[in-house]
Image (cartoon, rainbow, N blue to C red):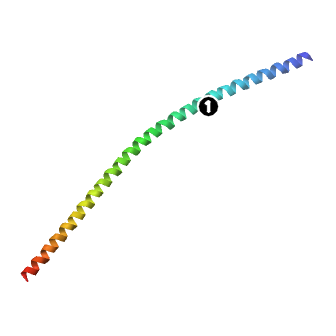
Amino acid sequence: MTNSCSFRITRTAEDLAQTVAAISQRLVKLEQRIDSLELNSNDSKDIQSDEEIVMLDGVDQLLQECKGLLNKSSNDVEGDEIWLEESVSNQDVAA
């Protein structure tokens, strides 16, 4: 009977040792996976921020161009108004 009990204890201890070893291996793999994901996350943030900066620079350039066109267009309208005023005053003089 002691042999049977001793066998069970030994068998249970071996099973526990295998379980602990398997859990330890899984833990190591999970830690490596977490490290890998953190690195990928940090890299993608850097890439995104660079891409965002380029996109924002493009948007800024478009805004400057639009402002320039608006200023040019407002100057052209003022020039057209002056030309119309001169044309009207010339017609009044001619009449």
Three-letter amino acid code of the residue under disc 1: Leu
> Residue lying farthest top?
3
Q: Would you place residue 1 above or below residue 71 in this image? A: above
Q: Report the quarter where the C terminus lies.
A: bottom left
User: Going 38% across and 44% down the picture, which residue do you hit?
Assistant: 53
Q: Name the quadrant containing residue 49.
A: top left
Q: How many marks can you see?
A: 1
Residue at x 85% of width, y 21% of height: 8
Quadrant location of the N terminus?
top right
Q: In this view, does 40 lie to the left or right of 70?
A: right
Q: Where is residue 13 in the image (x, y as percent from the top left)?
A: 79, 21
Residue at the farthest left position: 94
At x 73%, y 23%, the residue is 18
Circle 1: element type: helix
- As displayed, is residue 51 above or below residue 22? below
Circle 1 packing at 10 Å, graded few (<14), some (14-19), many (20+), is: few
User: In x, y percent, where is residue 11?
Assistant: 81, 21
Query: Which residue is under mark 1?
Result: 30
